[in-house]
Image (spheres, coloured by chain):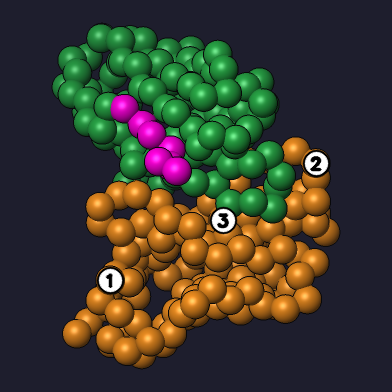
Amino acid sequence: AQKITQTQPGMFVQEKEAVTLDCTYDTSDPSYGLFWYKQPSSGEMIFLIYQGSYDQQNATEGRYSLNFQKARKSANLVISASQLGDSAMYFCAMREGANAGNNRKLIWGLGTSLAVNP
Amino acid sequence: DAGVIQSPRHEVTEMGQEVTLRCKPISGHNSLFWYRQTMMRGLELLIYFNNNVPIDDSGMPEDRFSAKMPNASFSTLKIQPSEPRDSAVYFCASSLRFANTEAFFGQGTRLTVV
């Protein structure tokens, strides 16, 4: 079974509008972390935002915010005021055992391709 | 900080040849990850190290793949012999060892095996 599901292979948004990229996850571990990365056409992977399972508030980083709904096991990325430079692939990832002493591997979704139209 | 440095950026090789990909993690990071990305399979974790010790290599496709981390500042991923199906972008990433920290990725190595 998929542990990270991104149901939108491709999304379009008009410049300056907000867009939500969906991510649902599956884990029985009460302690986990959720990450979003951006991959522009140049290929590098860029970290955007992190949400811990015990965090009381939704994470925000500039124009990025994470709509964390724990009961629904969803961690949607919201990009406000889209810019042309936001056109890229976006990946959701999860790490179980977020409070573990040592690092564990990230589990990745298949990504959503976002195109921002002028 | 220069970030995670991978070399080479591009590699074209003939089937059967040995390929070595190199990675220098961010100084102070003690977790290192090797990923492979293809259109068909997306991003796959091949292996990761904590404090230079391989923790999980279950993603290594087969015995043709091997990875080493002889010290905290250097890692290699070797494919011997290479096959056309190994063509992909290979990423190295590093992070602090704590599970709630993000991984920083290198620019990737685009490998083409002909």
Instruction: Check the residue under mark 3 and report the chain it is in.
Output: A
The answer to whether the residues at label 3 and label 1 have Cβ atoms under 8 Å apart is no
Q: Which residue is mark 3?
A: A93
- Residues marked 3 and 1, same chain: yes
Under circle 1, the secondary element is helix
In the figure, A35 relative to B54: above or below?
A: below
Give me the residue at 83% from left, 59% from top.
A30
User: Which is nearer the eye, B71 or A51?
Assistant: B71
Q: Could you say which is closer to the camera, residue B72 or residue B15?
A: B72
Q: Amino acid at mark 1?
A: Gly
Q: Which residue is mark 2?
A: A101
**A91 to B45, vertically: above or below:** below
Task: Check disc 2 and give the amino acid type.
Answer: Gly
Q: Which-is-in-front pick, marks 3 and 1?
A: 1
Q: Which residues are magenta?
A: B1-7
Chain under numbered label 1: A
Q: Which amino acid is tagged 3?
A: Ala
CA distance for labels 1 and 2? 37 Å
Decide which of B83, A19 is in the foreground and name it.
A19
- Numbered tag placed on residue A85 in the rendering: 1
Chain A on-screen colour: orange
Disc 2: host chain: A
Q: Would residue A109 appear left or right of A86 to someone viewing this image?
A: right
For this orientation, the residue located farthest to the front is: B1
Q: Give me the C-alpha separation between circle 2 and circle 3.
A: 19 Å
Q: Name the residue rendered at 25%, 9% in the picture.
A: B17
- Crowd tier of the residue under label 1, counting other residues whose Cα lies within 10 Å: few below 14, some 14–19, many 20 or above: few
Nearer the observer, A50 or B71 = B71
Q: Nearer the viewer, mark 2 or mark 3?
A: 2
The answer for how far apart the CA atoms under marks 3 and 1 are is: 22 Å
